[in-house]
Image: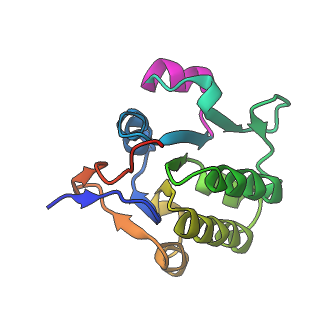
């Protein structure tokens, strides 16, 4: 039985590469989701490889740009994403780059970031999907990350039918 990606939840996909969650962009959009990708991949690469429009991307980068977010400024990223979720119950964020955020900050700060986002998702009935490479975290850190999340293993089937239609 597939795991249904439903509003109000944080989903952690265990994967070495973010390809699986990035391919979800079009499924979420077709199902009525207002999708935003936060990623380490350059927006041009996302457009070329996954067909994701650059205006739907926030790039985690030290480069200056209107759609770029400094990875060391987790507070601004947190505020931006919470405001995004507050816009409506069909908000979906695909987050790639958790390991990079930990490298640029520390684990405790990134865990707080993820916990704030989880609370916002639960209240706003949005969806947060992130990929985590288990090799990058200790067993204890993975347990903390998965505490409020639905964990999706590489072999798990998924379904995006649970997204409510746009109002």
Residue 117 drawn at (x, y percent): 63, 64
| Magenta stretch in the rendered image | 40-50
Return the residue nearer the eye: 150 or 48: 150
Q: Compared to 41, does 87 lie above or below? A: below
Q: Is residue 60 visible?
A: yes
Relative side of 67 to 137, left or right: right
| Membership of 45 in magenta stretch | yes
Residue at 37% across, 50% down: 163
**Where does the N terminus fall, quadrant-wise?**
bottom left
Residue at 45% across, 65% down: 9
Residue 28 drawn at (x, y percent): 40, 41
Q: Quadrant of residue 17?
A: top left
Quick one: which residue is furthest to the front in this view? 167
Residue 165 drawn at (x, y percent): 39, 44
Residue at 45% across, 44% down: 18
Q: Quadrant of residue 67?
A: top right
Main secondary structure found in the magenta portion: helix
Relative side of 146 to 44, left or right: left
Q: Compared to 158, does 26 lie above or below? A: above
Q: Is residue 42 visible?
A: no
């Amino acid at each position: 039985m597939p795991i249904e990606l439903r509003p109000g939840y944080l989903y952690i996909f265990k994967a070495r590469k973010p390809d699986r969650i990035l391919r979800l962009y079009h499924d979420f959009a077709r199902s009525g989701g207002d999708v935003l990708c936060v990623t380490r991949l350059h927006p041009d690469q996302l457009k070329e490889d996954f067909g994701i429009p650059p205006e739907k991307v926030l790039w985690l980068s030290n480069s200056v740009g209107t759609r770029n977010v400094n990875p060391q400024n987790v507070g601004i990223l947190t505020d931006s994403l919470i405001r995004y979720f507050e816009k409506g119950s069909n908000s979906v964020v695909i987050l790639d780059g958790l390991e990079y955020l930990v490298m640029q900050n520390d684990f405790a700060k990134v865990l707080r970031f993820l916990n704030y986002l989880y609370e916002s998702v639960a209240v706003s009935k949005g969806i947060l999907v992130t990929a985590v490479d288990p090799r990058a975290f200790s067993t204890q850190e993975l347990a903390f990350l998965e505490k409020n999340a639905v964990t999706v293993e590489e072999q798990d089937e998924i379904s995006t039918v649970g997204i409510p239609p746009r109002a």
